[in-house]
Amino acid sequence: MAKVVTKYICSNCGAVSLKYQGKCFECQSWGTLQETHVEPESKKQRSASSAGVAVVQNLHDVVPSEFQRILTGMGELDRVLGGGLMQASAVLVGGEPGIGKSTLMLHLAPRLAPAKVLYISGEESPNQIRERARRLSIKAENLWLVPEVNLERILALIEREKPALVIIDSIQTVHSEEYQSSAGTITQIRECAASLIRAAKQQNFILMIIGHITKEGALAGPKALEHMVDTVLQFEGEGYQRYRIIRSVKNRFGSTNEIGVFRMDETGLEEVSNPSEFFISGRRTDVAGNSILAALEGTRALLVEVQALVSKTNYSMPQRISTGFDLKRMSIILAVLENRLHMETWGQDVFVKIAGGLKLAEPAADLAIAAAIASGFMNRPVDPSTVCCGEIGLAGELRAISDSERRIREAAHLGFKRIVLPEANTRELKPSLKKLPVTIAGCATLREALEEMNIN
């Protein structure tokens, strides 16, 4: 019998160590090494696995596949997926407990009828799933439930039933008898996922894998799990909020950073066809400290409300707190406001929040953040009919941003009268944009932009 080897694998980066250490030697993360028992292959198994010879093909000789996308019937989900589900693909759906991952899978099944959907659950019994479907008024004659956690039996069942879509809820509960470690460990998650993905490619079915989120906010298991699948969808939002955001973190068949917005109601998840109205709903136009940003998420333009609160500090070190925006970038914007516009925020607590739970990463958000902070500092509301976007340089200049046309059209669509952009984006505008009922103001510096918005 082969000797079992104990290894320690980092759950953050997948690095392997032969002895336990408090800190991973690769990613320098503390407490991420997990003990794993590995039984090495025998010489006979290794020789058998290496006996086959791979076929070499020239690029021009490769026959293109005839795979087509399968529409889910949910416009927001199809947008995030890049136009629908791709055959023989593996999709990883991650999110915190109770965020709506299993509910989304139940909504997906009847929309794919008459295609056969196999729902493999390792956490709930068929009665529990049926009761949830009844509560959500979901009737799916093409949905078949299987309470199973053994990998070998799952693979045999898939080969026998030949479904079009397989849902694994969740990958942390599946285990293989070939490995001594318990379910949920790094080895089990990685090997079970690899076997299921291999079966999806060979048998030409769509694989949907549900993965839990750890307390650190990462998908449980090694990072290699995200590299193994074709698409990674991330559920965002709080369990006590009605709205959910699905973000495409990785997509081999479409654009990344696409988002879809859903609303959790008594009947389950409902699509929000116009998310801009959701992100700017309920805003106070008569209160200082908020601005409207024309953001870009993937291929979609969104209008987002940026809120800022500036108040005199009671501490020797003023607080800098940001929700939905990078704190270091906010510190840079504050430094530009102090040095270039002489706004003395060093004695003020500054709090910035992106309404709706959205997380902004693009450089075009700089101008909206600066406008909200300046509005709160000067106690002067921003013009409620104005939208802004632009990247701020350290000298206080506004730099060009990408895809300004979509931002302009979205602002005009929602009835805003003016949009403030960097001057470089207004030099060569299409004639169709000039006919829109919105004034396009190009500004070269941050000072000019704030004056355009009646702040400075």
Image (spheres, rainbow, N blue to C red):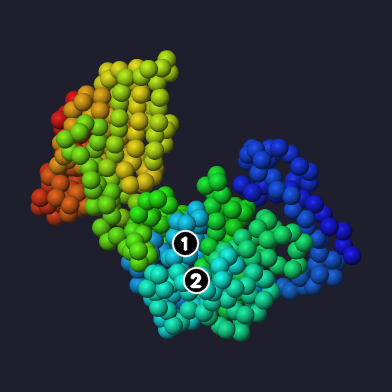
Q: In which quarter of the view is residue 80 placed?
A: bottom left
Q: Is residue 103 placed above or below 212 in the rendered structure?
A: below
- Left/right placement of residue 376 relative to residue 11 reads left
Regarding residue 74, the answer to whether it shows in the image is: yes
The label number, if any, that marks residue 60 in the structure image? none
Which residue appears at 42% of the width and 55% of the height? Answer: 247
As helix, strand or loop, the secondary structure at mark 1 comes to helix
Regarding residue 112, the answer to whether it shows in the image is: no
Q: In which quarter of the view is residue 156 placed?
A: bottom right
Residue identified by numbered label 1: 101
Dot 1 alpha-carbon crowd within 10 angstroms: few under 14, some 14 to 19, many 20 or more:
many
As helix, strand or loop, the secondary structure at mark 2 comes to helix
Q: Disc 2 or disc 1, which is closer to the eye?
A: 2
Which residue appears at 64% of the width and 66% of the height? Answer: 174
The label number, if any, that marks residue 129 in the structure image? 2
Could you say where residue 102 lies in the image, as x and y percent from the top left? 48, 65
Which residue appears at 47% of the width and 57% of the height? Answer: 98
